[in-house]
Image: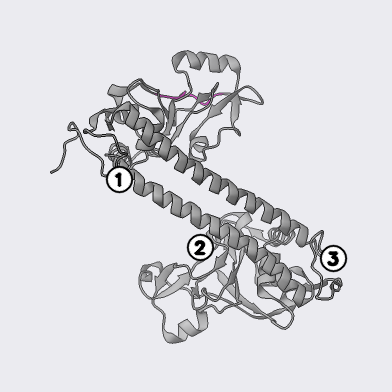
């Protein structure tokens, strides 16, 4: 039997000792809801923090702009941020909540809604409730989608339904889900630290052209140093270089797995992922399918920092095809380890060189001549492999933690569906 919003409901998953149905009331009947200042303030170098959408979506409230104390005092007389209040995005991004669990002295912009703490509910519980599929659907239905950026008015937030159990049950649910959130945040922090470590290691391994490894070197099986690194142009070690196939977007949907230039910026390797699908003839497939050890880069980018990001094709990535504006090349395996070259081409100094020769028009582009003219440094191939294996190990740890984050977030999403009504 379906329930109307006014009716009481029962969740599918419940802690022992709690029973009875949850009571549904409108959000605005349970608390007061405000928006932030409508006028963009004059920012100051120091002063009182000023929160906006990006701080809520990133769950980061330390790096903010500042407003003068007297401006904050005036706004504070209208609406005051306090511990246990909830900030929720309402313009652009809709419905991302963050509970204020610290002693706060700050102001906020109109793009955020402030849901005041209330004697009727546990704020941690409500911040989790806002994330449920049902509540997000209700926000979506009440959002003004024709506005740019899209937005939801305060009155519509207040009209949304809020189903509440007893306060003790709210506290139990909130404590459990807060522990899950802490696990997710710790995993995210671990990933960030590993990524920072990798960045530091890359800068210590790969020197500017003409130098040797800055700090990190390996030794041979006898404990001796490897020979000095050799400088070459990239084109000197490239065996084959060609551009991808052009296919109209209308053809995408079925057929062969194909990677486009826009896919390059969100991944670090071509490792068996699914991209767009497009039908190719056997001849086209043979010509435009990637092989293990190939490298791929984009010859154009919407942003300068993205130009010629180079990817490495693993065994699982073989037979993925590559599209227009991407370029595939293979190298002389006798002297070059492709995985080493992948890391080298994406290192700090190499990226600087790539961006220095890129051309800027509507898009940032790089010619084949300029790309293959980039100077690289090559240690002995045996040392290349050791360096590549070391960096692969770090990447595998990052990938493992990323999967843990995904699985824990998926677990929480399932809990929200079962523990709320």
Query: Is residue 109 rendered magenta in the image?
Result: no
Query: Is residue 36 rendered magenta in the image?
Result: yes
Q: Is residue 287 left or right of residue 350?
A: left
Residue at the image point whose x is 41% and y is 31% from the top? 124
**Residues in magenta, as a range:** 34-41
x%, y% of residue 100? 48, 28
Q: Nearer the viewer, residue 119 or 19?
A: 19
x%, y% of residue 192? 60, 49
Q: Residues within 10 Å of mark 3 (few under 14, many from 20)?
A: few
Residue at the image point whose x is 86% and y is 74% from the top? 227
Q: Quadrant of residue 105?
A: top right
Q: Which residue is mark 1?
A: 418
Q: Quadrant of residue 103?
A: top right
Q: Residues within 10 Å of mark 2 (few under 14, many from 20)?
A: few
List the single residue furthest toward the left: 1
> Distance of mark 3 from mark 1, alpha carbons?
60 Å
Camera-near label (3 vs 1) is 1
Q: Which mark is residue 263?
A: 2
């Amino acid at each position: 039997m379906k329930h109307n919003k006014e009716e009481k409901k029962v969740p599918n998953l419940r802690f022992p000792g709690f029973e009875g149905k949850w009571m549904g009331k409108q959000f605005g009947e349970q608390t007061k809801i405000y928006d932030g200042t409508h006028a963009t303030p004059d920012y100051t170098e120091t002063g009182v923090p000023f929160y906006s959408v990006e701080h809520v979506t990133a769950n980061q409230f330390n790096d903010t702009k500042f407003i003068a104390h007297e401006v904050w005092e005036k706004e504070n007389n209208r609406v005051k941020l306090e511990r246990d209040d909830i900030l929720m995005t309402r313009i652009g991004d809709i419905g991302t909540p963050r509970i204020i669990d610290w002693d706060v002295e700050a102001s906020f912009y109109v793009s955020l809604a402030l849901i005041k703490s209330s004697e009727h509910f546990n704020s941690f519980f409500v911040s989790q409730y806002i994330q449920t599929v049902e509540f997000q659907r209700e926000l979506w239905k009440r959002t003004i989608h024709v506005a740019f950026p899209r937005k939801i008015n305060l009155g519509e937030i207040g009209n949304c339904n809020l189903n509440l159990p007893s306060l003790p049950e709210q506290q139990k649910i909130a404590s459990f889900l807060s522990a899950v959130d802490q696990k997710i945040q710790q995993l995210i922090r671990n990933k960030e630290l590993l990524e920072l470590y990798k960045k530091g290691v890359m800068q210590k391994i790969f020197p500017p052209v003409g130098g040797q490894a800055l700090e990190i070197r390996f030794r041979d099986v006898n404990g001796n140093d490897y020979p000095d690194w050799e400088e070459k142009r990239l084109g000197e070690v490239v065996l084959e270089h060609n551009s991808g196939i052009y296919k109209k977007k209308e053809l995408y949907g079925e057929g062969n797995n194909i990677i486009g230039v826009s896919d390059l910026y969100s991944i670090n390797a071509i490792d068996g992922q699914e991209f767009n699908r497009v039908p190719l003839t056997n001849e086209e497939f043979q010509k435009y399918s990637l092989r293990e050890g190939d490298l791929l880069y984009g010859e154009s980018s919407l942003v300068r920092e993205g130009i010629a990001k180079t990817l490495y094709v693993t065994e699982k990535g073989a037979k993925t095809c590559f599209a227009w504006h991407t370029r595939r090349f293979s190298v002389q395996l006798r002297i070059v380890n492709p995985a080493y070259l992948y890391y080298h081409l994406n290192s700090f100094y190499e990226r600087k060189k790539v961006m220095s020769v890129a051309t800027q028009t509507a898009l940032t582009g790089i010619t084949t001549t300029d790309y293959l003219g980039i100077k690289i440094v090559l240690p002995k191939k045996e040392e290349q492999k050791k360096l590549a294996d070391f960096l692969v190990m770090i990447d595998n740890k990052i990938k493992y933690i990323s999967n843990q984050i995904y699985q824990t977030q998926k677990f929480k999403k399932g809990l929200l569906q079962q523990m709320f009504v």
